[in-house]
Image (cartoon, rainbow, N blue to C red):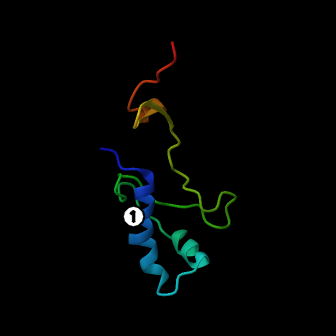
């Protein structure tokens, strides 16, 4: 079973960020506290890490080590990662 990235993000938000925000969260407070989260490699539920580029960086708020992958729906309800090969769960399929 794979764990969707949205679950990892939600879990990180509710377990790591929101406890730091306090009783009256605002969007600005949540963002500021999220940018301070630095979980080391293998710390999140999928085995990754959670650093974000700080506000002073051109890509502020982005995860610098997030893996970009290409997926392909190969049958109804089944999305497979096909690129890059290091993350692939299936070979790409091409129409005949």
Q: Residue at x 65, y 67 (%)?
A: 55
Toward the front, the furthest residue is 76
* Left or right: where 53 falls relative to 20: right
Which is nearer the eye, 51 or 73?
A: 73
Q: Residue at x 40, y 53 (%)?
A: 48
Toward the bottom, the furthest residue is 23
Which is nearer the eye, 10 or 62?
A: 10
Q: Residue at x 48, y 68 (%)?
A: 37
Residue 20: x, y in percent? Answer: 45, 80
> Callout 1: 10 Å neighbours few (<14), some, many (20+)?
some
Residue 4: x, y in percent? Answer: 40, 50
User: Looking at the image, is 2 positioned above or below residue 79?
Assistant: below
User: Looking at the image, is 70 positioned above or below residue 56?
Assistant: above
**Which quadrant of the figure has residue 29?**
bottom right
Q: Which residue is mark 1?
A: 11
Residue 33: x, y in percent? Answer: 53, 75
* Left or right: where 48 falls relative to 60: left
* Left or right: where 12 falls relative to 34: left
* Left or right: where 26 falls relative to 76: right
For the N terminus, the quadrant is: top left
Instruction: Assign a secondary structure to mark 1.
Output: helix
Q: Residue at x 59, y 57 (%)?
A: 62
Residue 27: x, y in percent? Answer: 59, 75
Say how many tags the image has.
Answer: 1
Toward the left, the furthest residue is 1
């Amino acid at each position: 079973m794979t764990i969707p990235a949205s679950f990892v993000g939600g879990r990180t938000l509710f377990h790591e960020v929101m406890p730091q925000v306090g009783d009256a969260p605002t969007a600005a407070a949540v963002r500021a506290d999220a940018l301070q989260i630095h979980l080391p490699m293998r710390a999140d539920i999928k085995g990754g890490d959670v650093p974000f580029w700080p506000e002073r960086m051109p890509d502020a708020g982005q995860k610098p080590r997030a893996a970009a992958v290409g997926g392909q729906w190969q049958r109804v309800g089944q999305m497979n990662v096909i690129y890059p090969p290091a993350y692939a769960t299936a070979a790409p399929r091409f129409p005949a």
